[in-house]
Amino acid sequence: MARDNLVYSTESGRIRPAEAVTERPKGDGIVRIQRQTSGRKGKGVCIITGLDLPDAELAKLAAELKKKCGCGGAVKEGDIEIQGDKRDLLKSLLEAKGLTVKLAGG
């Protein structure tokens, strides 16, 4: 009997540890929007960082921004990626929600 397949034991209870929830570092309250092309074959994306929201609310905000911009995007590691250079539109949309927004990078 291999111990790799053991899930529960009467001696010690649950064997496999529960998944740890990874916490993102807290930001300074400023949402930053930057344009990035590296590793994307020249295609530009806008990366929105500094949002201190739970994953569910982050996904909901990303879906709303993608609809208003009319483009695709994703949520990766606590950041929102929106395809294309839509920094000015994203800034106005996020400021309308009451967030402090800065355009980062060049």
Image (tube, grey):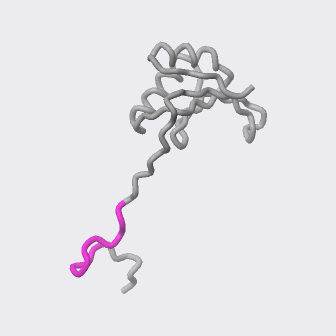
The residue under the point 56% across, 33% down is 49
Q: Nearer the viewer, residue 80 or 106?
A: 106
Query: Residue 54 location, x and y as percent?
Result: 40, 37
Please state which of residues 102 and 56 is positioned toward the viewer in this rendering. 102
Q: Nearer the viewer, residue 51 or 45?
A: 51
Determine if the magenta segment contains residue 23.
no
User: Is 26 left or right of 48, judged from the image as shown?
Assistant: left
Residue lying at 74% horizontally and 34% vertically, measured from the top left: 37
Answer left or right for 51 relative to 103: left
Seen at 45% across and 33% down, the residue is 59
In the rendered image of this protein, does residue 48 appear above or below residue 18?
above
The answer to whether residue 64 is left or right of residue 46 is: left
Which region shows up in magenta?
A: 8-18
In the orientation shown, which residue stands out farthest toward the front? 28
The residue nearer to you, when weighing 105 against 57, is: 105
* Residue 12 falls within the magenta-colored stretch: yes
x, y (%) of residue 23?
44, 48
**Residue farthest along the bottom direction in this orientation:** 1
Q: Is residue 23 above or below residue 58?
A: below
* Quarter of the figure with residue 52: top left
Above or below for 57 versus 7: above
Residue extending farthest to the left is: 10
Residue 95 coordinates in the image, percent (x, y): 51, 15
Residue shown at 61% from the left, 31% from the top? 47
